[in-house]
Image (spheres, rainbow, N blue to C red):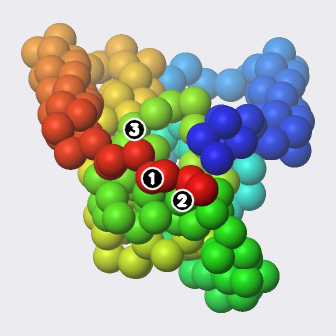
Amino acid sequence: MTGRLARVPRTGILVAVGLLAALVVAAVVLPVPDPAALRAWVSGAGVAAPALMFLAYVVATLVPIPRTVFSLASGLLLGPVVGVAVALAATAVSAVISFALARSLGRRLVARHLTRARVRAVDERLTGGGWLAVASLRIIPAIPFLPTNYACGLSSVRPRPYLAGTMIGSLPGTAAAVALGDTLTGTTPPALLAVYGVLAVAGAAGLWFAIRRRAIEPVTVS
């Protein structure tokens, strides 16, 4: 299952490449302001800027577009504090929507297969592990966001552990991406960068050790 989740869908790759190409063309053809000026311009929009970023983030992550792109944009445009808050809130909403879609539309299609040993083993790993099993998937950058949402929705994992694991596991990577976007403006104090780094490493290390201590026992497949 993990191997399948690690494969980024072709559609997502094509969309990401198309967006990158569009940005390169825009940077060459259009008079693009520097990051600091762009931040100042967005700040002048008031509460509309975080609201629009939140909506764009949610919509974009409901299709196979890398979430990191919008975490970087949140840091660049909104700054570290608001950027992290918007990115995490949008991550939660997008994760819940895709989870609900998979559970309501796809669960009945796979329910009849849950008696099969291999499918049941995967389902029990997610369900038995609770939030920690979900968090362990979220913390690995190679595992795409949207396919993980669908996989959890098709499993028997409960909504609350799913959301808790999503938020805890997504926090280190999201904070790091937002911090990187914030540094592009050149206005981030060095001390704050150090705090970002320590928090990201500490969060990832703490979750990793928790996963190692409470590793799910292998499920015997007959």
Q: Secondary structure at mark 3?
A: loop
Q: Residue at x 29, y 53 (%)?
A: 132
> Which of the 4 image quadrants contains residue 134?
bottom left
**Residue, disc 3:** 139
Residue 41 percent across, percent down from the top left: 48, 41
Q: Specify which label sits upstream in the sequence, 2 or 3.
A: 2
Question: Residues under labels 2 and 3: Cα distance?
Answer: 22 Å
**Residue, disc 2:** 121
Q: Is label 2 or label 3 in front? A: 2
116, above or below 46, in the image = below
Q: Residue at x 46, y 33 (%)?
A: 140
Question: Residues under labels 2 and 1: Cα distance?
Answer: 6 Å
Q: Residues within 10 Å of mark 2 (few under 14, many from 20)?
A: some
Q: Label for residue 219?
A: 1
Q: Specify which label sits upstream in the sequence, 2 or 1.
A: 2
The type of residue carrying mark 3 is: Ile
Would you say the residues marked 1 and 3 are in contact, meaning their CB atoms lie under 8 Å apart? Answer: no
Residue 103 percent across, percent down from the top left: 61, 81
162, above or below 109, in the image = above
The type of residue carrying mark 1 is: Val
Q: Specify which label sits upstream in the sequence, 1 or 3.
A: 3
Which of 107 and 216 lies nearest the eye of the viewer? 216
Would you say the residues marked 2 and 1 are in contact, meaning their CB atoms lie under 8 Å apart? Answer: yes
